[in-house]
Amino acid sequence: MTLKSLAILLGVLVPLVATAQEKIVNVYSSRHYQTDEALYTGFTRATGIKVNRIEAGEDALIERIRNEGARSPGDVLITVDAGRLWRAEQLGLFQPIRSPVLDSRIPQSFREPGGQWFGFSMRARVLAYNKARVRPDELRRYEDLADAKWKGRICARSSSNIYNLSLMGALIDRLGEARAEEWARAVRANLARDPKGGDTDQLKAVAAGECDVAISNHYYYARLARSAKPDEKAIAGKLGVALPGLAGTGTHVNISGAGVLKHAPHREAAVRFLEYLASDEAQRYFADGNNEWPVVASARVANPVLSAIGEISYDPINVAVLGRNQPLAQKIFDRVGWK
Ligand SMILES: [Fe+2]
């Protein structure tokens, strides 16, 4: 090979190698929905940046990122519930991001104020009830559950569950610690059985007549309602869904969200990925994959079950408050004996 041809060959190769290094984003995700595939291909189509996915359970991913430390190849962490994103933040896994796109697209209440993490879809903690035994107007507020008329009629999962901790975090903020504890004590006394199982198990218990009301995230109901299995559809058929208010505000909602990891090797690509998630197109895929609502108002999903649940008016509490109140929330649950 002549020197000249070697120079030409290198001239071709070097830029290719440099580009290949830049055009990648490594996404750690605890999501596993079919529609997420469309998100990744959509992002690559729009930007030319390839997405490498590492999927695992939430806690396993957080543990992995911790162990990898400064050598972590991870650029982005996607997970569910503000309480969990907050935990990752407390472990120092994220870096703050300032993006005019994210700031303008995502409502303030769905972003960590320091830019450590951002919500991309919204889930509501609803009250599912037995339509044959309960009228929806009996469940206008979460506070209603404390009434003695519900004695032996409520099903709920354990207090260590992140969804319940986030709900209690909102109650603490809106009602104050003392009233939040009173509420927890009263609801605990109204439980039909000791807390056990996940949200879907609470819904099944209502349909089976074991209790009349269950505290559950709305998408577990949506999954049953959209199920191809007749027995699951039948369970949803017995249930109504109330969107309760809290202390004069709207329904308690939470998020699925993401942040840029502290040692992200491809920081710029990571920011572009988050910005893409806030686009109308991505919002629809991201939210609909789990029957959630988009956080960006202009992105509308055509989801029959969400439409049937109704227009949601939500409590605009900042998601970071849910994390901050998490330790106190657990203390309150422990004090009232909510297992
Ligand atoms: Fe869930």
Image: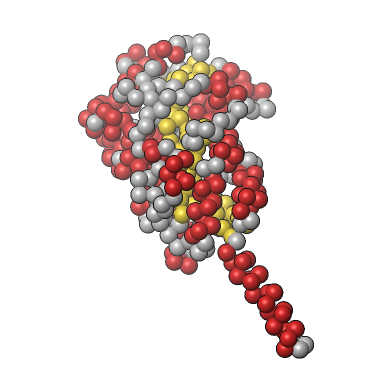
Choose between 252 and 157: the one closer to the eye: 252
Residue sitting at 59 percent across and 60 percent down? 24
Residue sitting at 46 percent across and 45 percent down? 102
Q: Is residue 76 above or below residue 227?
A: below
In the rendered image, which quarter is residue 5 located in? bottom right
On the image, the x and y values in percent for residue 160 come to: 38, 39
Q: How is the image coloured?
A: secondary structure
Q: Which quadrant: the N terminus?
A: bottom right
On the image, the x and y values in percent for residue 223 come to: 58, 30
On the image, the x and y values in percent for residue 54 come to: 57, 55
Q: Is residue 337 above or below residue 147?
A: below
Residue sitting at 42 percent across and 32 percent down? 253
Choose between 271 and 331: the one closer to the eye: 271
On the image, the x and y values in percent for residue 258 come to: 47, 48
In the rendered image, which quarter is residue 67 located in? bottom left
Count of numbered labels shown in the rendering = 0
Choose between 6 and 131: the one closer to the eye: 6
In the rendered image, which quarter is residue 106 located in? top left
Choose between 52 and 57: the one closer to the eye: 52
Looking at the image, residue 74 sits to the left or right of residue 97; the answer is right
